[in-house]
Image (cartoon, helix red, strand yellow):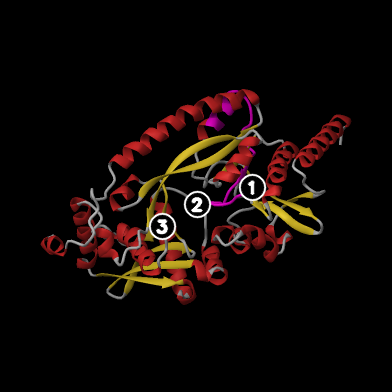
């Protein structure tokens, strides 16, 4: 290490010591892990909580099956803090060499860097790969470790000389901690369905306007009239052949869109083995043969729609497999929220309402930080206006009925 680099490191250590003192954080060590194999599953899960996407089995499974790692543009640089011989904080962190698979789009920022002869990549991304779901990103044993973990992210950014640190879909308290450390906030929009304690799918339909209700019934009828039978299979009951079929459907969808699949059959089999209690597979069959499949993950409170594919086209089958089967599953199990994935205004007509999502962005170069900050302010105003417009077109009846209109349903 050069004398200048040593002086810079000493200054960072002093700054970190001052920060720790202000927040009364005990002495600790910062580790950068090249793989989650370097931390025991029980230690990681103790910090991560119950969301399946944050579990050691999910994130390490991506590494084991080569969905992330060398050659993918997703290089693990997980940050973990150790104090008193225990892991007290951690964050899933990746050194990124592109912006694929993130669902928060910064391609224009990368082009601006390139136009000025600067390198935007590598950047650092704190996120769940290929998964646009909200949840904790700064995993801490207690809130006192939040400032230390924010500082650790900044320290890793400086050490690796990356252009920026991006944290996708964190909760409010973590956004505040990151913003206090100098990160900028960015808004986005997703569509989520909320369970109002519906007795059954018809009770949900009764809350929709007549035209929306009629459209959904017509779509479901088109699928059944085509001779398609839907099956919902929970993880422990999914066979190897069914996983293989889903993987085929998944690859087919990506090929149809001219894209390279992010995940592979080995990862799906890994899910079925290590996170079976969180997996729902929807399979569409015709004449006893599977023709389409959709993959969801769930816990007690959430269902997350993730992937879908078909080897045969049936009108409206996408809506049935990806939305209506999931809605029925949530109603049957009392699951409160169904997150339908990124984007998709078509979800509004099916009872999914707009929800503002958030990400944070810390840009090392002050000139670009200022320009991006101006952009985010304008973009945020546009997002707020967009959400207001969507809410004005909510699909629900005004006022919502207290009972299902069986006589009207029969006439539809």
Mark 3 vs 1, N-terminal side: 1
Q: Position of residue 119 (x, y in %)?
A: 63, 31
- Left or right: residue 230 versus residue 269 is left
Residue depth check, mark 2 versus mark 1: number of the one nearer the observer: 2
Mark 2 vs 3, N-terminal side: 2
* Residue identifier under label 2: 133
Real-space Cα separation, disc 2 to disc 3, in angstroms:
11 Å
- Left or right: residue 169 versus residue 284 is right
Q: Residue at 50%, 67% (x, y): give it.
A: 278
Real-space Cα separation, disc 3 to disc 1, in angstroms:
27 Å
Vertical side of 323 occupied by 372: above or below: above
Real-space Cα separation, disc 2 to disc 1, in angstroms:
17 Å
Instruction: Decide: few, some or many residues near mark 3? Use Cα within 10 Å; few <14, some 14-19, many ≥20.
Output: many
Circles 3 and 1 in contact, beta carbons < 8 Å: no
Residue 120 included in the magenta stretch of the image: yes
Instruction: Decide: few, some or many residues near mark 2? Use Cα within 10 Å; few <14, some 14-19, many ≥20.
Output: many
Q: Position of residue 309 (x, y in %)?
A: 38, 59
Q: Point out the stretch of residues depicted in magenta.
A: 109-137
Say which of 30 and 14 sits in front. Answer: 14
Say which of 112 and 141 sits in front. Answer: 141
Q: Position of residue 65 (x, y in %)?
A: 60, 61
Q: Position of residue 9 (x, y in %)?
A: 82, 36
* Residue identifier under label 1: 94
Is most of the magenta stretch helix, strand or loop?
loop
On residue 104, the disc is none
On residue 338, the disc is 3
Q: What SS does tag 1 mark? A: strand
């Amino acid at each position: 290490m050069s004398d200048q680099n040593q002086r810079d490191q000493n200054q960072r250590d002093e700054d970190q010591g001052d920060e720790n003192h202000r927040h009364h954080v005990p002495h600790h060590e910062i580790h950068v892990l090249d793989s989650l194999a370097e931390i025991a599953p029980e230690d990681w899960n103790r910090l991560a909580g119950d969301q399946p996407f944050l579990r050691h089995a999910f994130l390490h499974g991506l590494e084991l099956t080569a969905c992330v790692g060398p050659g993918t543009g997703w290089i693990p640089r997980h940050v973990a803090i150790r104090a008193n011989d225990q892991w007290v904080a951690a964050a899933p962190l990746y050194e990124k060499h592109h912006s694929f698979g993130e669902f928060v789009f910064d391609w224009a920022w990368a082009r601006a860097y390139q136009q000025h002869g600067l390198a935007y990549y590598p950047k650092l991304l704190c996120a769940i790969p290929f998964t646009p779901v909200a949840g904790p990103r700064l995993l801490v044993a207690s809130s006192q470790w939040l400032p230390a973990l924010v500082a650790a992210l900044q320290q890793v950014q400086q050490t690796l000389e990356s252009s920026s640190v991006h944290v996708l879909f964190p909760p409010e308290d973590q956004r505040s901690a990151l913003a206090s450390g100098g990160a900028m906030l960015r808004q986005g929009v997703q569509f989520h369905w909320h369970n109002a304690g519906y007795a059954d799918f018809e009770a949900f339909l009764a809350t929709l306007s007549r035209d929306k209700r009629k459209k959904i019934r017509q779509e479901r009828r088109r699928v059944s009239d085509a001779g398609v039978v839907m099956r919902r299979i929970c993880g422990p009951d999914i066979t190897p052949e069914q996983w293989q079929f889903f993987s085929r459907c998944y690859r087919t969808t990506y090929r149809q869109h001219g894209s390279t699949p992010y995940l592979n059959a080995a990862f799906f089999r890994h899910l079925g083995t290590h996170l079976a209690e969180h997996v729902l597979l929807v399979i569409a069959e015709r004449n006893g043969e599977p023709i389409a499949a959709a993959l969801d993950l769930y816990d007690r409170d959430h269902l997350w729609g993730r992937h879908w594919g078909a080897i045969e086209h049936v009108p409206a089958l996408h809506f049935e497999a990806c939305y209506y089967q999931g809605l029925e599953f949530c109603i049957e199990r009392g699951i409160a929220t169904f997150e339908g994935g990124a984007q998709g205004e078509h979800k509004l007509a099916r009872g999914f309402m707009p929800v503002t999502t958030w990400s944070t962005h810390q840009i090392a170069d002050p000139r670009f930080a200022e320009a991006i900050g101006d952009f985010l302010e304008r973009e945020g105003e546009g997002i707020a206006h967009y959400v207001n417009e969507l809410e004005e077109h909510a699909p629900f009846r005004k006022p919502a009925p207290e009972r299902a209109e069986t006589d009207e349903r029969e006439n539809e």
